[in-house]
Amino acid sequence: MRLWTLVAALVAGAAVATPAVAGPIIGQVPDVGGMNGYLSMCLKYKGQQEWNCYLTHLRSAVLKYRDPARQLPQLDVVVERSGGFLAGNCHMMMHVVGRDYARAHGVTLQTLQRYLPLSNDPGCSAGFGMGLVMGLSKQILDDGPKGANALCAKAPTRMRNYTCYHSLGHAYMRFFHGGLKYALEACRALGAQALDCEQGSFHDYWLARSGEDGARFDKGAPATARQLCARQKGLVVIACWYRYYLSLPPKQAPSTPARIEGLCRGLAALQREGCIASASLLSNLDPTRQFSICTRLPVGDIDSCMRGVGTQNLTDPVFAGRKLIAGCAAVAKAARAGCYEWFGLSLTVLSDGKFSCGALSRASARSACRAGAKREGDPLVTFA
C-alpha cells in the first residue's frame, strides 16, 4: 500500500502561504476579474441558497479535475482573492466535494496520494483532502491502527501529519455513523497522537449537532459542550470543547473579554480551559485582534485564550508571526512564558519549521519560544 499525506487545517478563513504550483488549471477556474470575484452569480442569494449555489458550481468544476493535487491549490488562490462568504466556507463545501470526488473517481488508499492537494492551505485544499479521507473511512478502518499510523507518519511536514490525524477522527465518525464512543476508541488505539484524532471526532460531532456537512446526530446524545465534555477525562476535555462554538456559535459573538468570560462562567480547571479556547477561536477573524482580546482576560485565562488565536490566518507565519509573538512581551508576567511557548510551537508547525525564535530580543523569551517549538511532535490538541 502506498503511504499518503494529508493537508491543511480546519478553520475557515484566510490561508497560510502555499507553495507555488506549476502549470495552469485545466480550463476550470477563470480569472477572478472585477470586484465580484469567482462564481459571482451566487452573490444574489443569501444563507442556504448562497451555500447551495457555490457548492453546486464548485462540485461541477472540481469533479472534472484531472489533477486535483495541483489544481486545488490554485483554486485556493482564486477563492481567497474573492473573499467573503465563499472564502469563509470553501473548506466545509470541499468536505462534500471531496467525498463525491472519491466516489466518482474510484479513489483508494493505494491511489490517494496522487489526489491530495500539494498545499498547507486550510481553505479549499484542506477541506477537499479531508473529504477524500472521509470517503475512504472503511478502507482506513480495515487497515487498523498500525496502518493508520503508518499513513500519517509519512506525511512530509508536521502540519500535514497533524491534519492527517485530525481527519482520521472525522473518518472514524463517518464509518461508525456518528457513534462518538466507537470513534474515540478507534482514535485511542492510535497511541501517541490519539488526542488530535479525538479532536477531529469531536469536531464531527459538533458539525452533526449543527446540522452541517451531512453528519449524523443522535437526538438523545448530549447537545452542549457543558454536557458532553463533562463526561471526558484529561486533555480530551479540551479537545472536546475546542470547535464547539465554531460549529454552534452563541447568539452574541464572543468578541470581547467580557463575552468570553460570560460564556465560560461557572466552569473550572480543564473545562474552563477548553471553553475559553473555544470562545477565543470565534472571537475575531484577525489574529492580531484575537491576541489583543486575550491579553485583557484574567491572567489565569490568557494561556487558554491564546490557543484559539488563528495563526493560520496570518499573511505569513514567519514574518507576520514574528510580530505576533513579539506581543507576548506585553502580556501579564504570569502568562508570558506560556504565550511564547504556544506561539513558538504553532508558528513552527505552520511554517514547516521555518519560523525562528532567535529574533526575539530577550533570552527568556527565546528560551520559552524554543521550548514550545521542541514540542511540535506532541499532540497539538487545539490547533488550526
Image: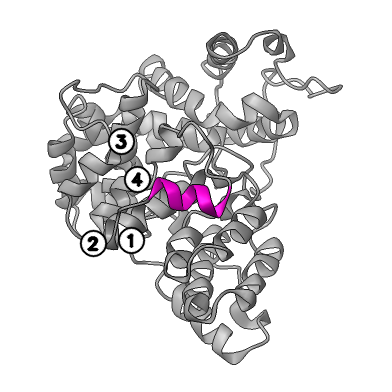
Task: Return the residue nearer the eye: 186 or 217.
Answer: 217
Give the spatial CA distance, label 1 vs label 4. 10 Å
Circles 3, 4 touching at the beta carbon (< 8 Å): yes
Circles 3, 1 touching at the beta carbon (< 8 Å): no
Q: Is 164 left or right of 118, judged from the image as shown? A: left
Give the spatial CA distance, label 3 vs label 2. 18 Å
* Image quadrant where one finds the N terminus: top left
Q: Would residue 371 be seen by someone viewing this image from the given angle?
A: yes
Work out whether mark 1 precedes mark 4 in sequence or the reverse, and give the earlier one. 4
Task: Return the residue nearer the eye: 140 or 377.
Answer: 377
Magenta span: helix, strand or loop, mainly?
Answer: helix
Work out whether mark 2 precedes mark 4 in sequence or the reverse, and give the earlier one. 4
- Residue for point 75% across, 33% down: 81
Q: Residues within 10 Å of mark 2 (few under 14, many from 20)?
A: few
Residue 379: image tag:
1
Q: Position of residue 112 (x, y in %)?
A: 38, 34
Residue 170: image tag:
3
Q: Residues within 10 Å of mark 1 (few under 14, many from 20)?
A: some
Q: Which residue is mark 2?
A: 192
Q: Which residue is mark 4?
A: 166
Q: Secondary structure at mark 3?
A: helix
Work out whether mark 3 precedes mark 2 in sequence or the reverse, and give the earlier one. 3
Give the spatial CA distance, label 2 vs label 4. 13 Å
Circles 1, 2 touching at the beta carbon (< 8 Å): yes
